[in-house]
Amino acid sequence: MGRPPKEISTRAEPFAAHPHVFVCSPSHILARTDDIMPAVLEAHPFIVREPGSGTLAALDRFFEQHRITPPVAMELESNEAVKQAVMAGLGVSFLSLHTIKLELDQELLCVLDVVGAPVMRAWNLTYTLGKYLSPTAEAFRYFILERGEPFLISEFQEHHLNLMQNTTKP
C-alpha cells in the first residue's frame, strides 16, 4: 500500500521507494522541456485524483511547498481514468511512476522534468495487527521486504533509471 488505513489497527513496513512524477501527453507543450520550474505548472490544467487519495495528498503538499495553485480541469477516481484523460491531451497530472510503465514504454505518456520531482513516497507491506501471519505469509513478508525494492527498480532500468537510481528504502 502507498498509504496504510488509519481506521483500523495495522502494521505498515516500508519496503520500497514509491516515486510520483508529473506526466503529460507526448504532444503537450511541456513534453520536451527540461528543468521546468514548479511555477510554470500554474499555467496548465491538472487532472487529479479524488479527495482522500494518497496521490492527491502528495500533489497538494508539492503545490503547498512551492506556493502554487494550478487549475484543476477534472477530478477522477482511478489512475486508469487519469491516464486516459492525460493521453487525450486534456491536461497534465501527477501519478505513481509504477502505474505508468506501459504508457511510458509505448510513448503514450511523457514524464515532465519538473524541478523537485519525483516526489518520493513509500510502498508499505501492510497487515492487520490483530492477526498472526501464517508461516507462508511470514515467508512472503520477508521476501517482499528483502526483494521488493530491487525488483521495482529493475522494472524501470531500461527507460527510467534516472528517476529511480537514487532511491533508498524510506
Image: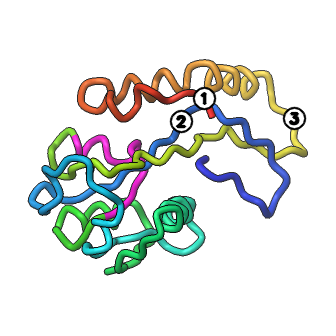
Front-lying residue, 10 or 58: 58
Q: Position of residue 147 (x, y in %)?
A: 56, 20
Q: Position of residue 166 (x, y in %)?
A: 45, 27
Q: Residue at x 36, y 28 (%)?
A: 155
Q: Amino acid at mark 1?
A: Lys
Q: Amino acid at mark 2?
A: Ala
Report the Cα–Cα distance between label 2 and label 1: 6 Å
**Residue numbers of the magenta segment:** 93-104
Q: Secondary structure beneath disc 3?
A: loop
Residue under label 1? 169
Residue under label 2? 17
Identify the image's colour scheme: rainbow, by chain, secondary structure or one colour.
Answer: rainbow
Q: Amino acid at mark 3?
A: Tyr
Q: Secondary structure beneath disc 2?
A: strand
**Foreground disc of the pair 3, 2:** 2
5 part of magenta stretch: no
Q: Looking at the image, is mark 1 or mark 3 earlier in the sequence? A: 3
Q: Residue furthest right?
A: 130
Q: Residue at x 19, y 62 (%)?
A: 87
Residue under label 3? 132
**12 over 159 or under it: above or below:** below
**Foreground disc of the pair 1, 3:** 1
